[in-house]
Amino acid sequence: MGRRPTVVPSTVTPAATGPQSVPPSRFEAVAETLASGEDPHGVCSVVGRMLGADGASLEDALGGLRATWLEVRGSDPSFDATSALLAAWSDETLAYVHQLSCADPMTGLSSLVHVRSRLTELYLRSDRVHEDWAMVVCELPLPPVPAADGSDGAYRLVHSMRLARAGQCVRTVFVLGETVGRVGSRRVAALVERDGRLGDRVRLLRRLLEDVVDHTPTARVWIEGLPVDDVNAALLLDDLAR
């Protein structure tokens, strides 16, 4: 996800202390502060934020702090220093998680999990979801596979580009904030409200999709009815994702 490698805690024990001992990566400032006898609380906070930005695990963070403390003072880290490190690590890690997108990185479409969550929200708010809502599903045909095992990188890229273009077509037709997501390897689904124009919109979508696929058969588009409850809606999504 573009994050830097995690910190590998040092295996140095108090017996190895001395001029040649090296603190774990990112903990150099902590070691210097401890050696000078200064309060390490602020430095531990800074290191905690750096570790969180690096994507370091909680185990790596605690292991690095303990190894550093053992190298310099021959004891376990203090409670205050540990708390400062963990609080900063937690804040930075949560900030990163909150920035994550619910979109599929290759196509920009909402993920299957997001579509599932949106369905759950609808069922929690109303017992008429199966009457008032539906899914418009677009299924792309399989393009020619240049490699015998279907693993060719160019094949995957072309397929993802077609899915992205199909998603753009769906968004062009359904422009009122409908959830549009990738469902399976070849399908795009839009969660839409039923109204008198739904059939016309589906026909327009079919025409737009003719330019996405440059070979026959063309993309399939259909209106998928929703079940009466959330449990069966989840089963429907699982079936469409296959």
Image (cartoon, helix red, strand yellow):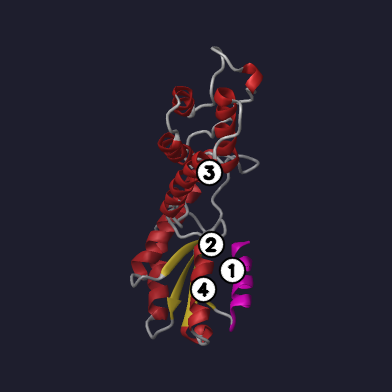
Q: In the image, what residue type sits under mark 3? A: Tyr
Front-most of residues 50 and 115? 50
Choose top left, top right, bottom left or bottom right for residue 179: bottom left
Local crowd at mark 4 within 10 Å, few (<14), some, or many (≥20)?
many
The answer to whether 179 is drawn above or below residue 165 in the figure is below
Q: Which of pointers 1 and 2 lies earlier in the amino acid sequence?
A: 2
- Residue most extreme to the top: 19
Residue 241 placement (x, y as % from top left) = 60, 62
Amino acid carrying mark 1 in the image: Leu
Q: Which residue is mark 4?
A: 119
Q: Determine the main secondary structure of the stretch shown in magenta.
A: helix
Q: Is the C-beta separation of discs 4 and 2 under 8 Å?
A: no
Residue 106 or 81: which is nearer the viewer? 81
> Nearer the N terminus, badge 4 or badge 2?
2
Which is nearer the eye, 12 or 126?
Answer: 12
- Image location of residue 49, percent across then percent down: 43, 40
The amino acid pointed to by label 4 is Leu
Specify the quadrant of the image occupied by residue 58.
top right
Do callouts 1 and 2 mark residues in contact (Cβ within 8 Å)?
A: yes
Contact check, label 4 and label 1, Cβ < 8 Å: yes
Question: Which secondary structure lies at badge 1?
Answer: helix
Residue wearing tag 1: 237
Q: Which residue is mark 3?
A: 155
Q: Residue at x 45, y 23 (%)?
A: 32
Q: Quadrant of the C terminus?
A: bottom right
Seen in the picture, residue 212 relative to 32 is either above or below; the reply is below
Residue 189 drawn at (x, y percent): 49, 67
For numbered disc 4, what is the local secondary structure? helix
- Res 15 seen here: yes
